[in-house]
Image (cartoon, coloured by chain):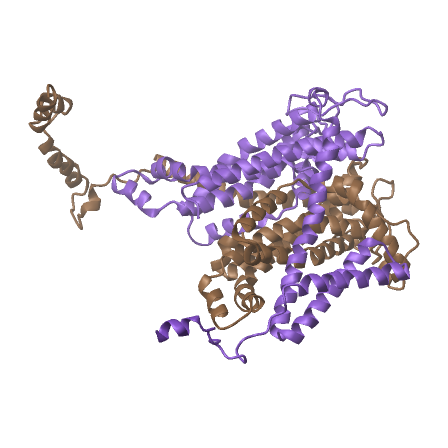
Chain colours: A purple, B brown
Amino acid sequence: MTTTVTSHRPRPATTPDTLRTKRLPRYAAPAIALAALLVAAAVVLGAGIGNWVLVVVLGALLYLIGLYLAAKAVEGARSARNRTWSALIHSAFVLAVLPLASVVWTLLSKGVERLDGDFFLTSMNNIGARDANGGAYHAIIGTLEQVGIATLITVPLGILCAVYIVEYGRGKFAFAIRFFVDVMTGIPSIVSGLFVLAFWVLIVSPWFNDGRPSFSGFAAALALSVLMLPTVVRSTEEMLRLVPAPLREGAYALGVPKWKTILRVVLPTALPGIVTGVMLAIARAAGETAPVLLVAGGGAAINFNPFENNQSSLSLFVYQQAGDASRFSPARAWTAALTLVALVLILTIAAKLLARRNRLGR
Amino acid sequence: MGETPHRSADAGTGGTRVTESHEWPAGASARVAEAPVSTRTPGGTGLGGGGALPRARAFGAERAFRGLTLAAGTAVLVIIAAIAVFLVAKAVPALRADTANFWTYEGWSPNEAQPKFGIGTLAFGTVLSAALGLLIAVPVALGIALYLSHYAPRRVGTTLGFLIDLLAAVPSVVFGLWGREIFINPVRDFSVWLNKYFSWIPLFGGEGPFGKSILLGALVLAIMVLPIVTSLSREVFLQTPTANEEAALALGATRWEMIRTAVLPYGRPGIIAAVMLGLGRALGETIALAMTLGITFGISFNLIQNGGNTIAANIANAFGEANETGRGALIASGLVLFAITLIVNITARVIIYRRREFTESAA
């Protein structure tokens, strides 16, 4: 009987009051925020020193101060610091989302204006400042050809380089290669453009072209492959390191020579990861403007031949249309930007999804 | 049960089909394999199991493949060296023709009969805009990275992290277009406001016009660098050992104290690497800055007046009307940019390599 009686009685607190921390009530934070906004609005609009943006900024500052003071009075200094940092971290997130959301929104809303068949099927040849039509067909051709050639150059070179670093390289030489691949990741795109300008356009191309330097899509592909190479090498290298050693040892134990082990066992195992890296590199190269500007020259007409004469690319098209004086050019620039972003994002998303399905994933 | 017993009986006894394909019975093969070994090494010293392996040939597939990979590896070093060599080769004639001091002259007119150009203003603008952009981007990026790794619910954190990775892939020309057409309006209003109330600070002085300024360029740069720094440092934060975090929490630390004592110290090399890589990208950024800065020549700390220029933006803008000396001058400025970014990158890599355990996460 006694047990049932005690169970109905209110249970005594298991911890004494001195050990339990006092907490701010749930409504405290919204209340402080509201008060801070009201004070900020009164100060800013009353003194006439700014508009609603300043109200929000000042309100946020007042909220942080008010929250810190209130929490310090009730919960203590450590908890107050915790709350303030938590609020700061959340506001950093909001602060960054605003411009990025604005980029996406403008891209979509302005990009659909010229999103028609005409845009994808015509070039800018004979399009004057007063013509509303004109399109990016030549630029799309240019982007596809340049990136395609760059991929053909980069992928074998990059994979072989990664194989050397992982499978054969020993000592200082391999370390130097690894180190400089990392350093190469940071080479600015404009420098790679200048390099190809100095090397290919100004020195090599006059041999084929009656002594006059000539721009070409191939030169742009060379510049892009300088930019793609480190990405391909790094991702391939990481994937090769993830291939389990027993697979290699099994092949060796069966008497398979090392080169055949690499070609038939190691590379196929790492293939999905390598493809992911290559696709990310392609996505990066497709968005580069500066090298194409320097060595392909741009152009208004369709040019299918990447080895002769000027070629344009989507990103260069955006740049040139944005700087154009015609009142129709901004619409073309936005639609081209939307096309470019769609191309790059499809590649990136496909690469990431492929990476997620990868058996060797970390 | 028609054929199966027949087939198995055939295989068990070593039927005619099996022995037909070999010239000798299976048991003989071991003796045949031994014979060439003893003839190959007549001395017979240290004859182990390895002696049965075929000798490495001078021009076998193994050597060829190895040589191929070695050549590909060497190509990286050759490319880096070639960049330096060819830039120098084209820059030197232009530098010879320069009638002003390349390091100090404030201006860029290499296409005249008397070419005059100097790198000083451009290098200053490059460093100023990149430093300002990083100053804005890094605290925000670290905040987001912490939010995604330690504050947001797991599912939200993963999804948003994926979105941030996507944003890192958006081409710079898109950010440039957005900055030039959209973002310039709020920045101009903000500049006018700053100028009205804070013109006593030299940074915000000037008479206008405002808008295409260092401030706009640096803000666009910050927005571009943000996803890179965020995704790199988020990955580092996620790798903090759970034991460290739980130990801090078990000792009674608040969430912020746990981050300060467990997460940040563990991630410091990764953060430094992320910031340096962001700096490398900010220094080399071309098109976004060529579209948002008001190209002028002059060293000024004024952030809000139209103006500002960087090495890379100047190359993109001045390339169109450059003659031979003009191209050489631009290549010379590119060489300076190459040197600056090379120093920054090598410094970053040395920091990372000194703490090898972070290499994979930070690269």
Position of the N terminus of chain A by quadrant:
bottom left
Quadrant location of residue A357?
top left
- Residue A11, given in percent of the width and then of the height, sits at 46, 73
Quadrant location of residue B267?
bottom right
Residue reaching furthest to the right: B207
Residue reaching furthest to the front: A1
Q: Is residue A273 above or below residue B2?
A: below
Q: Residue at x 67, y 65 (%)?
A: A28
Q: Is residue B336 above or below residue A58?
A: above
- Residue B328, given in percent of the width and then of the height, sits at 75, 41
**Can residue B326 be spotted in the picture?**
no
Q: Residue at x 63, y 47 (%)?
A: A187
Query: A154 or A282, which is in the foreground?
Result: A282
Q: Residue at x 82, y 54 (%)?
A: A52
Specify whether A319 is left or right of A357: right
- Residue B110, given in percent of the width and then of the height, sits at 83, 43
Q: How many marks?
A: 0
Query: A63 or B301, which is in the foreground?
Result: A63
Q: Is residue B276 above or below residue B253?
A: above
Specify whether A155 is left or right of A141: left
**Can residue A3 be spotted in the picture?**
yes
- Residue A78, given in percent of the width and then of the height, sits at 60, 73
Query: B19 or B186, which is in the foreground?
Result: B186
Specify whether A165 is left or right of A215: left
